[in-house]
Image (cartoon, helix red, strand yellow):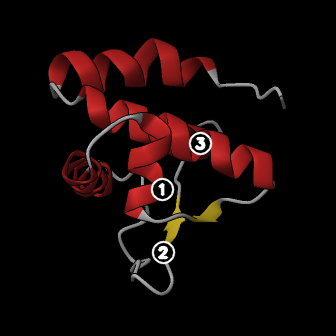
Amino acid sequence: MKRITVNSYVLDVLMPDLIGHDRRPAAFIVYLFLLRETACSGRDTVSVSLQTIATRTGLSKSAVQVSIRHLRRRALLDPTVVATVANPLRRILRPWEQRSR
């Protein structure tokens, strides 16, 4: 099993914000899943369907859909990348990295 490193911002700031403030724990789980997938691929985009995310996280497909919409509104997923059934591309954003530059 491959080991990944998670920026402390994700656990110290993003987790309490999504779970406590927004009351969207499923969104945090989906973001962590996509963060892992992009870390393993070495790119900021990943092609993964709603059903695959649901199966691999234990969430329902509808919970994944709602979570992805929320993550787009929060600018944690790129809203300009349109995922389709044939091309389920997702681009993860890391706004805390842009601020530190």
- The answer to whether the residue labelled 1 contacts the one labelled 2, judged by CB atoms less than 8 Å apart, is yes
Q: Which residue is mark 2?
A: 88
Q: Residue at x 25, y 57 (%)?
A: 65
Amino acid carrying label 3: it is Leu
Q: Position of residue 62 (x, y in %)?
A: 19, 53
* Position of 47 relative to 41 (above/below): below
Tell me whether the residue at label 1 lies in contact with that at label 3, contact meaning CB atoms closer than 8 angstroms. no
Q: Residue at position x 24%, y 55% from top? A: 73
Between disc 2 and disc 3, the foreground one is: 2
**What label sits on residue 36 in the rendered view?**
none
Q: In which quadrant is the N terminus drawn?
A: top right
Name the residue nearer the viewer: 73 or 31: 31
Q: Disc 1 marks which residue?
A: 52
Crowd around label 3: few <14 · some 14–19 · many ≥20 (10 Å): many
Q: Give me the C-alpha separation between circle 1 and circle 3.
A: 15 Å
- Give the residue type that dot 1 points to: Thr
Q: Which residue is situated farthest in the bottom direction here?
A: 86
Tell me the quarter of the image containing the C terminus.
top right
Find residue 38 and report its horizontal and vertical position in percent: 67, 51
Q: How many marks?
A: 3
| Real-space CA distance between mark 2 and mark 3, rounded to the nearest whole angstrom | 16 Å
Q: Position of residue 77 (x, y in %)?
A: 42, 57
Query: Dot 2: what SS?
Result: loop
Q: Nearer the viewer, mark 1 or mark 3?
A: 1
Residue located 31% across and 57% down the image: 72
Label 3, on which residue?
35
Alpha carbon distance from label 1 to label 2: 10 Å
Residue 71's place in the image compared with 48, above or below, is above
Mark 1 lies on a secondary structure that is helix
Q: Is residue 32 left or right of residue 20?
A: right
Which numbered mark, 1 or 2, is in the foreground of this view? 1
